[in-house]
Image: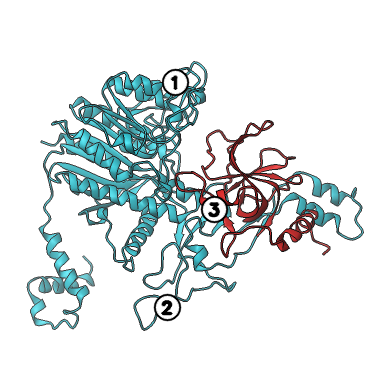
Amino acid sequence: MLTLSRRRLLLSLAASPLAAAPTVARAGDGPILLRDLYEKDRSFSALATGLEGRRISVEGFMAPPLRAESSFFVLTRRPMAVCPFCNDAADWPADIVAIYTKRQVRVIAFNIPIAVDGRLELGTYKDPDLGFVSRVRLVDAVYDRI
Amino acid sequence: MTIRSFPLTLAGMFLATGAFAQVELTQQDSQWFTDGESRIDELAAIQPNTGKAKNVILFIADGNGVGTNYATRLWVGQQEGGMGEDYVLPQEAFPNLALVKTYTTNGQTPDSAPTASAMNTGVKSRNGTINVDDAGAYDSCDAAANAGLTTFSEIVSDMGKSVGVVTTARVTHATPAAVYAKTANRDWEDNTGLPENCAQKDIAAQLVDAVDAGTVDFVMGGGRRHFLPNGITDDEGAEGRRTDDRNLIEEIEGKGWQYVWNSDTASQIDNSKPVLGLFEASHMQYEEDRDGEPTLAEMTEMAINNLSDNDDGFYLQVEAGRVDHANHAGNLHRAVTDGAAFADAIEQAVSMVDPEETLIIVTADHEHAIAFNGYCGRGTPITGLCYQVDDNGTQHTGEPNVGLDGKPYTAAGYLNGVGSVMREVVPEEAEATHENVDGQAETSAEAEAADAPAQPEYTGSRPDLTQEEATDVDYLQQALIPMTSETHSGEDVALMANGPWSHLFRGVMEQNMIFHVMNYAVNAE
């Protein structure tokens, strides 16, 4: 345990009660993939609308965060190294989830798969501080590597 | 002639004069053998077409070198129920083939700007520039004005032909832009990137000029945001990027063009008018994700129908722009599904034009850092795990090959990119580990050294992998060097061609020769 990082310790502490909690919804037998929340025409899936307001666990990747100290990051379906916040030429994919975390975000590299547990919010929302417009959010979220 | 080769040559002559009948060929009933003989008959019957090319269609799948084309061949063959290796893509049935050297004047590894430029002007040039001579510096506003090159579209429109550009990328992206624009920087897609008082216009604005000049008649792809002013939202709610208050879509519509923006509006095209189709704010969707947008084959069909109204013929450049993007992302699934859409577009064109008067060229602008593992058995799914060869059967055993680490690996991989098995050790981890080293004060020299900004540390091992994971549509094939985006490579690409003077494509050629064959074919007497 000597080499266990502070971040990992915090995350595992935060995640462990959730992992045991039966209230965290998962799709069928497996976890919810980010793509399960959207239809091809970018509308919300039946799964997403059915789970609105509930705590769910979604797998994806952490896009490079906008700010160093923040409680916000973007969850992407595939690893995304070029951050559209910092590179004007890059575009956000249509199917992303905005994550508002319980605690300050500890960065996990963009290409490491993570699972995020949080309460699902649907509908267009413009963040008053960041100006970031999202359609799907997980709030009060905790996360860890898969 | 060496002494050693002399008797062999004699033997060859003997065989050529009918020795087959005297030697019993034990393999003569093999289907491989009889198929080979039939193919020889077909090949021997092919005559060079030395007529004048009325039409030229240049198909470019961006980033679709020999390796990526190979992956697409297997993918399509496997989707159609076969093992894949023996499948023939429509372009692979063309009679003429060359390997193309894609280096540029300053790049062993090219980008898509000077490669498209070489095809459209006949000369190689500098990475990052489009239709600008090598003497014109990259990023220099004067370069395009002073060193701009005459394009194939300018030449053929002067001959009375129509010109079309179709792409799944933004129409202002490097490959399509090479049909109508000249720029010292490929990123100047709208005015926001241009330096102040720049002597050249941005790429989207140059499309308007090409409309005025009559050097383009049909345009389809993505990229609405570069045509609309900031503050104006497009048909799907995305905002324009221009800061010069110009609405280029309205400007082009005002010149007698029709504008379409989705499958429905595109289906109502009036072929008596030129067409601007912009189906996305940025690039069009990958084929895997496509919804409400035409396929590359449908856009190709619309272009040929529209341009064929001109009795003098046409030049059409069709780009599968996102094979490249999928490779950059390290996601082979989307590279091959967009590669399959490219093949469909070629098949569509072949079915619509007369090969006697239409030169069709199929190539790529460059390859990627894609590579293939062995030893995989026949029918190994090309995006999935490399299954073992069955020593006594034909199809693979279904058992994955493993590395010395005991873990399976995929048939395809990348030398670098987002799918790297190396992962950054995040600073928090490094710091925390350091603090926990017994007996070290936080203010020690070691601790201070650890706190100083340093090269990020990467480490890793290959994750274990199931076939379900590897063949997932979002899977990124394993890569070695960690990069934000997988890179191009300088490896040769293939070129396959049919129609007038397509037999001039042979051997290993420079990429700029593509222009010269096209130019020769349209001017042949």
Is residue A112 shown left or right of residue A2? left
Q: Residue B67 appears in which quarter of the rendering?
A: bottom left
Q: Residues within 10 Å of mark 3 (few under 14, many from 20)?
A: some
Q: Do badges 2 and 1 share one subunit?
A: yes
Q: Residue furthest front?
A: A50
In the rendered image, the vertical position of residue B226 relative to residue B331, given as above or below: above
Q: Residues within 10 Å of mark 1 (few under 14, many from 20)?
A: some
In the image, residue B481 lies at what x, y percent? 57, 54
State the residue position of label 1. Answer: B142
Amino acid marked by disc 3: Leu
Is residue B195 shown left or right of residue B165? right
Q: Residue B37 appears in which quarter of the rendering?
A: bottom left
Q: Which numbered marker is on residue B397?
A: 2
Amino acid marked by disc 1: Asp
Identify the secondary structure beneath mark 1. helix
The residue lying at 53 percent from left, 47 percent from top is: B485
Marks 2 and 1, how far apart at CA: 62 Å
Identify the secondary structure beneath mark 3. helix
State the residue position of label 3. Answer: A47
The residue lying at 41 percent from left, 28 percent from top is: B135
Identify the secondary structure beneath mark 2. loop
Q: Chain of mark 3?
A: A
The residue lying at 56 percent from left, 63 percent from top is: A28
Look at the image and give the colour of chain A: red
Look at the image and give the colour of chain B: cyan
Marks 2 and 3, how far apart at CA: 38 Å
Q: Chain of mark 2?
A: B
The residue nearer to you, when weighing B105 against B61, is B61
* Image quadrant in which the N terminus of chain B is located: bottom left
In the image, residue A34 lies at what x, y percent? 56, 52
The residue nearer to you, when weighing A111 against A126, is A126
